[in-house]
Image (cartoon, rainbow, N blue to C red):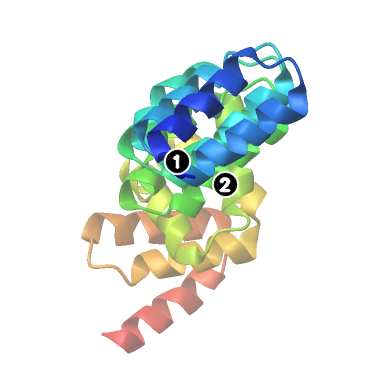
Amino acid sequence: MRKPSTTTSVDELIHVLRHKRTLPARIDAIRQLTHIGGSRAVKALCAALDYNEPALRKAAANGLAALKDATAVRALESALSDDEFSVRDAVIEALESIGSTNAIKVLRKALSDAEQSIRLKAATSLANIGTPSALQTLGYALQDNALAQEAVTQALLTTSVEQSLQVLAGLMCDRRQRAQQILVSVFQTLGQDHTFAILEAALSTRGWKLSVSAVEMMARTCGRRVIEALTHALERV
């Protein structure tokens, strides 16, 4: 007996996903489509993000996370407005897994989600992606609104000093009053030790503007430790 082709299998699985009434069979179809992969599977899973059952929508998002196909970003962006928290949570994971330029843009939007844990997950996802574009996006998002600022700041508590500096470098070089106020607020939340480590790292960069800003911010937030940092910096010259 001839084994059915992959094309036939995909057709059959899409039919099950669209028309079967039993939820387990439809979720199993999603799992098999994820295993097979390909553009038709991605398209079917994107369509499933609009199905009535939350379990199907979540399973579809999980499948798209595994497939890492950038063509799914538009559908995932729409799914960020899903009423179910678990679905939005899975959508964030899928966007992180894809990690494309458009996925990063959508994650920035998620930083303003009504649910605090979703905002934090979006910020953490951008940090996990870790590309210069993703980290720069976190820096820009600090100026979006109070919700985004809170999420990004909380994410910075768990990132490396190097990543934190990449996120904050733009604000540190921005001399406008609002940017400096946001920066002070972020550093107050991070605490003096984390703040000192970031500012000390800034002193080691070759950017004159960033180094000057680091010294000024140290004087405002770290008190006498600015002398310690300057001494270390001079020892490296």
Residue type at mark 2? Thr
The answer, for residue 178, to whether it is visible in the render is no
Give the image quarter of residue 230: bottom left
Residue type at mark 1? Leu
Q: Is residue 57 left or right of residue 208?
A: right
Give the image quarter of residue 31: top right
Residue situated furthest bottom in the rendering: 235
Pick whichever, 114 or 224, lies toward us.
Answer: 114
Q: Residue at x 46, y 75 (%)?
A: 229
Q: Which residue is mark 2?
A: 124
Pick whichever, 146 or 76, lies toward us.
Answer: 76
Q: CA distance from mark 1 to mark 2?
A: 10 Å
Mark in front: 1 vs 2 = 2
Position of 207 relative to 224 (above/below): above
Q: Residues within 10 Å of mark 2 (few under 14, many from 20)?
A: many
Q: Residue at x 62, y 13 (%)?
A: 19
Q: Residue at x 57, y 13 (%)?
A: 50
Q: Residues within 10 Å of mark 1 (few under 14, many from 20)?
A: many
Q: What numbered label is drawn on residue 138?
A: 1
